[in-house]
Image: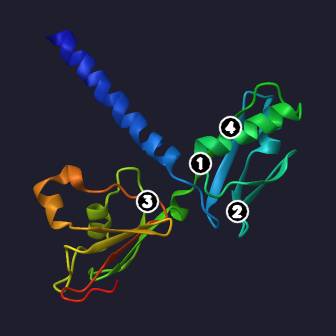
């Protein structure tokens, strides 16, 4: 029994450590976001010369040392890391580089507007859902239509009945950076 408990505890620790990283790696990059780019598996003087903090430009590009500009918007973090590593190998700059791209938290936001107590931006975290985003905006106000909450992601709108989330929290939708949540006024529908 102790062994089973130990395995279960280990599983929970590993899951808690990896889940935020996996969710963050699946979020796509957008123009205007700031990312830290770090190089490893090369001589220390090269790490300092290569590593940088950059903002993705309006065209969705990053300017990477030795490579030049590459388009990164619409790609997830692991795809961007792989592209940079591949280009560095193909250009024979490094034989086995490891690239880490980390978005800065302040540029990873979810917008919450409409009938909430404090409309605005909520900083993205890996465990953020529609309801925790609304909670981060002060919660619903007295005029909120909780059955027709709109989640907009990449131009696609999904209408959610958030009253079901209190009965079954597993239905609560995870959000991604750049998502927009709009809570309409009860009795009014702006389709």
Q: Which residue is mark 2?
A: 60
Residue tagged 3: 124
Which quadrant of the rendered structure holds the N terminus?
Answer: top left
The disc placed on residue 102 is: 1
Front residue of 153 and 4: 153
CA neighbours of label 2 inside 10 A, class few (<14), some (14 to 19), many (20+): some
Residue 57: image quadrant is: bottom right
Q: Mark 4 touching mark 1, by CB under 8 A? A: no
Q: Which mark is residue 165?
A: none
Dot 1: few (<14), some (14–19), or many (≥20) neighbours within 10 Å? some
Distance from the alpha carbon under mark 1 to that under mark 3: 13 Å
Circles 3 and 2: CB atoms closer than 8 Å: no
In the rendered image, residue 67, in percent from the top left (x then y), is placed at 85, 46
10 Å crowding of disc 4: few (<14), some (14-19), many (20+): some
Residue 127: x percent and y percent? 35, 51
Label placed on residue 82: 4
Residue 174 position (above or below residue 7): below
Q: Position of residue 68 (x, y in %)?
A: 85, 51
Choose the circle earlier in sequence order: 4 or 1. Answer: 4
Q: Residue furthest front?
A: 191
Disc 1 element: strand
Nearest the viewer among 102 and 76 is 76
Q: Are marks 4 and 2 in contact (CB under 8 Å)?
A: no
Label 3 to label 2, Cα distance in Å?
Answer: 20 Å
Q: Alpha-carbon distance for marks 4 and 1?
A: 13 Å
Q: Is residue 125 above or below residue 180?
A: above
**Outermost left residue:** 167
């Amino acid at each position: 029994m102790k062994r089973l408990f130990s395995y279960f505890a280990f599983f929970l620790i590993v899951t808690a450590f990896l889940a935020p990283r996996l969710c963050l790696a699946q979020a796509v990059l957008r123009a205007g976001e700031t990312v830290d780019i770090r190089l490893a598996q090369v001589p220390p003087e090269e790490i300092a010369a290569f590593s940088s903090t950059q903002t993705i430009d309006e065209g969705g590009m990053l300017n990477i040392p030795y490579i030049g500009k590459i388009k990164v918007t619409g790609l997830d973090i692991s795809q961007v890391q792989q592209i940079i590593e591949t280009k560095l190998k193909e250009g024979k700059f490094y034989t086995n580089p490891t690239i880490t791209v980390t978005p800065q938290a302040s540029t990873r936001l979810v917008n919450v507007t409409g009938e909430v107590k404090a409309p605005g931006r909520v900083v993205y975290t890996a465990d953020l859902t529609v309801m925790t985003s609304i909670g981060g905006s002060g919660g619903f106000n007295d005029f909120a239509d909780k059955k027709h909450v709109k989640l907009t992601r990449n131009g696609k709108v999904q209408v959610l009945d958030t009253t079901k989330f209190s009965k079954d929290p597993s239905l609560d939708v995870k959000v991604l950076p750049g998502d927009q949540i709009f809570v309409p006024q009860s009795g009014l529908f702006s389709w």
